[in-house]
Image: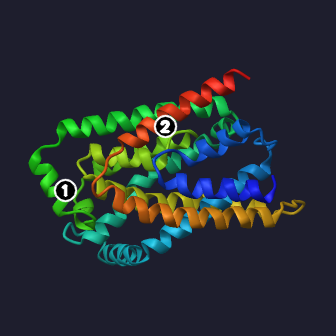
């Protein structure tokens, strides 16, 4: 990997991590499509991806910093009282995020090695990217069937309302967490899966996106923190310059993405991303299988 490739892959990860199009999928598919001689089996490639994910999670943490301070304070109140007050929106929101994080966290730890083997299979990732497009289209279509004029009016009036998110049930939070688990398969988008899950449990597009971004922060951060010590393990000599260049590009891409998407979903839907993923996955499959 050279510096141009590191910056391109870093920016790609930062942008596509928050767009519902799968950052891992794009990072794995792009090098072989462009003919880049990057060994995706090498430990360095995984460390590089982890570093770019860490940069993305730190941007999300900074973007929603005030919200996280309210959430942490609310959780502190509930721990002190040993009770989650249903009227304490931020306390309830914090525990909903914890509950929704559990499925992907447990499955990720149980199947870590098997899942990592898929990272080096661009053909499998292309197939998952195609399926991600179908998932987004299906979630959007089902949401449209369920929605009524009153739902849309309420959704518009309560955009970006943490109070509305905090009203979903614990079971609904588990459902969103299970949807997020699909993103353990490279090619499925974490944002897309959780956004689709949010829509299916009754959230509107702005609040499903907001919940998705809040939910992404702890699991991406935790995964990065668990893996990054390998960067400084004895006997390793990873090129820190390439890693820092990729991480910086990822941070810039993530910041631009979250600003854009938080406004985009106020009025728009998942369908353009569904069409893109289906087309990108199908084209990648055809190109890679023809070689």
Residue 25 visible here: yes
**Residue 182: percent from left, percent from top:** 48, 40
Mark in the foreground, 1 or 2: 2
Residue 175 visible here: no
Which secondary structure lies at badge 2? helix
Name the quadrant containing residue 178.
top left
Q: Which residue is mark 2?
A: 277
Q: Residue furthest left?
A: 150
**Residue 204: percent from left, percent from top:** 25, 52
Label 2 neighbourhood size at 10 Å, few (<14), some (14-19), many (20+)? many
Between the residue at mark 1 and the residue at mark 2, the CA separation in whole angstroms equals 27 Å
Report the residue at 37% width, 49% height from top: 195
Report the residue at 37% width, 77% height from top: 76
Point out which mark residue 270 bears. none
Q: 19 and 238: which one is in front?
A: 19
Q: Which residue is mark 1?
A: 155
């Amino acid at each position: 990997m050279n510096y141009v490739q590191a910056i391109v892959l870093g920016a790609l990860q930062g942008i596509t991590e928050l767009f519902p199009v799968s950052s891992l999928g794009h990072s794995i598919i792009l090098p072989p499509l462009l003919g880049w001689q990057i060994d995706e089996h090498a430990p360095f490639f995984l460390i590089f991806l982890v570093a770019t994910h860490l940069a993305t999670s730190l941007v999300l943490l900074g973007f929603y910093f005030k919200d996280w301070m309210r959430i942490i304070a609310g959780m502190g109140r509930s721990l002190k009282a040993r009770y989650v007050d249903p009227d304490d929106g931020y306390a309830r929101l914090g525990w909903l995020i914890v509950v929704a994080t559990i499925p992907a966290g447990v499955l990720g730890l149980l199947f870590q090695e098997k899942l990592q083997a898929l990272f080096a299979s661009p053909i499998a990732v292309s197939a998952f990217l195609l399926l991600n497009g179908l998932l987004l289209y299906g979630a959007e279509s089902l949401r449209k069937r369920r929605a009524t004029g009153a739902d849309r009016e309420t959704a518009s009036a309560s955009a970006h309302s943490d109070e509305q998110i905090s009203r979903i049930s614990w079971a609904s939070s588990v459902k969103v967490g299970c949807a997020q688990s699909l993103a353990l398969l490279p090619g499925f988008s974490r944002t897309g899966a959780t956004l689709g899950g949010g829509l299916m449990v009754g959230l509107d597009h702005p609040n499903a996106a907001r919940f998705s971004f809040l939910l992404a922060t702890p699991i991406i951060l935790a995964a990065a923190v668990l893996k990054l010590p390998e960067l400084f393990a004895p006997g390793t000599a990873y090129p820190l310059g390439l890693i820092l260049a990729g991480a910086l590009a990822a941070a810039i891409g993530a910041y631009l993405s979250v600003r854009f998407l938080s406004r985009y979903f106020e009025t728009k839907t998942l369908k353009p991303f569904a069409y893109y993923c289906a087309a990108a996955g199908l084209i990648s499959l055809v190109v890679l299988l023809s070689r």
